[in-house]
Image: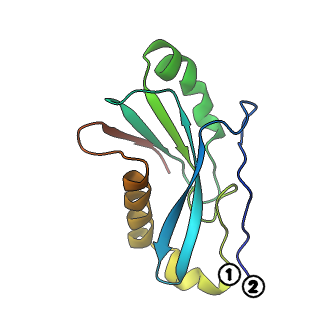
Amino acid sequence: MSPIIREPQSSTSRGSAGVQFIPITTPVGTFKVWTRKVGDNAHVKILLLHGGPAFTTEYFESFEPYLVDDKGYELYYYHQLGSYLSDQPGTEHDDTLWTPHRFVEEVEQVRKGLGINSENGYFVGNS
């Protein structure tokens, strides 16, 4: 089965502004994961980690009025590999792609791809 490749889009009514696909290198190939930047702040960048991969990021949208509009922070929505707006590799890769270690490496690649570092980066997530 071939991976499902999605065209750039937004999961919200705010359109596709700020959408960026980050390439993720895995043991079975390179795939793209969906991210969307909201706000602009070089000093406070927050990467939102949804539970899943069955969940996505819509429930984080309630943070925007406070964290972006009031506080002026920069938020990054991110769909893990296999989640709705990111590439969805075929099931033949289940044993190699769906491990905690591989997901940690994915977050690291996303962090670097978005320019988030120890000086400006924060993570908010749940499972």
- Colour scheme in the image? rainbow
Quadrant of the frame with the N terminus: bottom right
Q: Residue at horizontal 45%, vertical 30%?
A: 74
Residue drawn at x 64%, y 59% is: 86
Foreground of the two, 123 or 35: 35
Q: How far across and down, in percent of the image, does residue 5 sit?
A: 72, 67
Q: Secondary structure at mark 1?
A: helix
Measured from the top left, where is residue 85 in percent x and y? Answer: 68, 55
Q: Is residue 44 left or right of residue 99?
A: left
Location of residue 37 by image quarter: top right
Residue at x 45% of width, y 44% of height: 125
Relative to residue 71, is residue 104 depicted above or below?
below
Amino acid carrying label 1: it is: Thr
Residue placed at 46% from the left, 82% from the top?
27
2 or 1: mark nearer the eye: 2
**Along the line of sight, which residue is nearer the eye, 41 or 77?**
41
Q: Which residue is mark 2?
A: 1
Nearest the eye: 54 or 116:
116
- Give the mark nearer the N terminus: 2 vs 1: 2
Q: Residue furthest top?
A: 70
Q: How many C-alpha atoms fall within 10 Å of the one at disc 1: few (<14), some, or many (≥20)?
A: few
Q: Is residue 117 left or right of residue 65?
A: left
* Percent position of residue 53, x then y: 59, 60
* Residues at discs 2 and 1 in contact (Cβ within 8 Å): yes
Which numbered tag is attached to residue 91? 1
Q: Secondary structure at mark 2?
A: loop
